[in-house]
Image: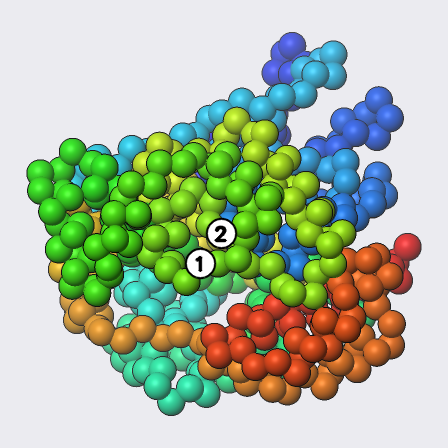
Amino acid sequence: MSSLVQDGGLVIACDSSGTIRAQGSASGTSAVFWARRGDEILVSDRQETLFRRTRPEVSRDELVIRLTEAQMDFPFSEGIIWTGVSMVHPGNWLRITADGRVDEVSWWRTPDPIDAVESLSPVLHDALVEVIDSLVDSTDLLSMDLSGGLDSTTLVYIARQCSMDDINTLFFRTADPANHDHFWSDRAARDVRSTHKICDYVSMMVEENWDRFSEDLFAWMPEGPSDDARYLALADEIGRLYENSKSVAHVNGHGGDELFAAMPAMAWSMAHSHVRHGLRDVFSWSQVNKFRWSATLQHVRRHEGPVSDLLRIARGVSARASDMFVEGARWVPAMRLPKYLTNEARDNFSKRALQYAERADLMLHHDRTSHQVRGATLYHGTLVRRTEQMLPSGSGVRLVSPYLDDRVVAIAMRLRIEDRFRADVIKPLLAAARPENMPIDYFQRHDKGEYSFETFVAFSSSRDRIRSLFSEGSVLVDMGLIDPDVLNQELSAYSPDGLVYEDLLRVEMVERWLRSFSATR
């Protein structure tokens, strides 16, 4: 049955014995949720459907996770905001027998990283072509992100290779003069002769659009408050652009960075592989990157398992260490909790960490890099699924994420560690699999666009708004989850890396979601 869900759709089937099987994609772009209502077992691909039929409460523990950066990392990224609603782990299928027994059965496993670039690149190229080519007959219009980064740019060139004549591309221009993504995006748009639309990045930030989304935020985000809120204005904009089109596929590059680029645990994996001179190469690499030898030893000698990492987090050892290279080899990264969380909220956080520590499937692969890559694809799958729910009803737009396609993930994760670690270009497997019409110098660029500048811009215009919002009273304060005095102190604090600003923008979003949800009760 796995072949039936390669397009990311949900499949539900029933056999002659009355056993029901429900299955989503391996990356979570589509997922299976279930809940009990009396003697009934309800199954759906949307949490919203189960909410309306069972009217569950908001999970207090999960709400605290959504107030922190932990929501981006496995296993915290799999949390459900509703009590009594469960999600089938992507890569498993749900089995419901005729007598009402429910369990999960694995159908997908993380591939071993054993193959060379040379053997994988033609297979990866063909798989990406197959995903893009399938859109020709199934859609009226092809729309594509074109950020100027390698992932979206490669997909645009593949679309041109597939002889797609009418390609629409979108670029979001940052206000940061040091960001040169626009140069690469404009170049690719000219090469493939796309209809290229440039939008202002700041205008697409949700912080600039709360007047449009705040009141109905629960309807926009039925899976609960999350960092995916940053895509609200983008999803609405795409829906407006193509409101008169019957069928539009909007292609994005989610998951490409993690599948093809360097990962935090890469040195650990190289040192623990059986590659000739692997350990020597790790120390040479750390010297070039100016990492201390003592830090390199700490990194490669790390031996704790994911349970140990979660227990460490549950004990409150959660502040991010200054040496992120050393921390990069962990199964579950250290978590930085906002100062304004109350002791009660911190207890909720620890409780959720202990619950995850009891799971038997915490190690997504015995190799730490493969584990991190798999965890990242699950996060991006969740992000894409939630973003698709933000698209205006009846818009005819669907999101397509080729790098999260089950076939593509299975191929890319087979890349052996020495080819990832010793690469001469950025994203060596993607570079080798690129279409012939795409120049190699895209993969030789030394700059990479980043958008922390916009965080500072957004917060500078948000500080007074957040202060005003919480001066009106607060659901989070009433729940005993945040300390309003500490929150006010943080609103006046300076954050050189912008992380505190991200926390404050996040707490505003959660507060607005709770108010919108309360209005529906």
For residue 334, the mark is 2
The answer to whether residue 10 is seen in the rendering is: no
Answer left or right for 266 relative to 218: left
The residue closer to the viewer here, 146 or 202, is 202
Residue at the farthest front position: 294
Disc 2 from disc 1: Cα separation: 8 Å
Report the mark closest to the observer, 2 or 1.
1
**Residue 169, picture quadrant:** bottom left
Q: Is residue 138 above or below residue 203?
A: above
The residue closer to the viewer here, 95 or 208, is 208
The residue closer to the viewer here, 62 or 225, is 62
Q: Is residue 313 above or below residue 210?
A: above
Circle 1 residue: 321
Residue at the farthest left position: 276
Tell which circle, 2 or 1, labels the residue nearer the N-terminal end.
Answer: 1
Secondary structure at badge 2 equals loop
**Residue placed at 40% from the left, 30% from the top?**
109
Secondary structure at badge 1 equals loop
Position in image of residue 324 (x %, y %): 38, 58
Q: What residue type is labelled 1?
A: Ala
Q: Mark 1 and mark 2 in contact (Cβ < 8 Å)?
A: yes
Position in image of residue 136 (x %, y %): 40, 56
Q: What residue type is labelled 2?
A: Ala
For disc 1, the neighbor class at 10 Å (few under 14, some 14 to 19, many from 20) is some
Answer left or right for 316 relative to 488: left
For disc 2, the neighbor class at 10 Å (few under 14, some 14 to 19, many from 20) is many
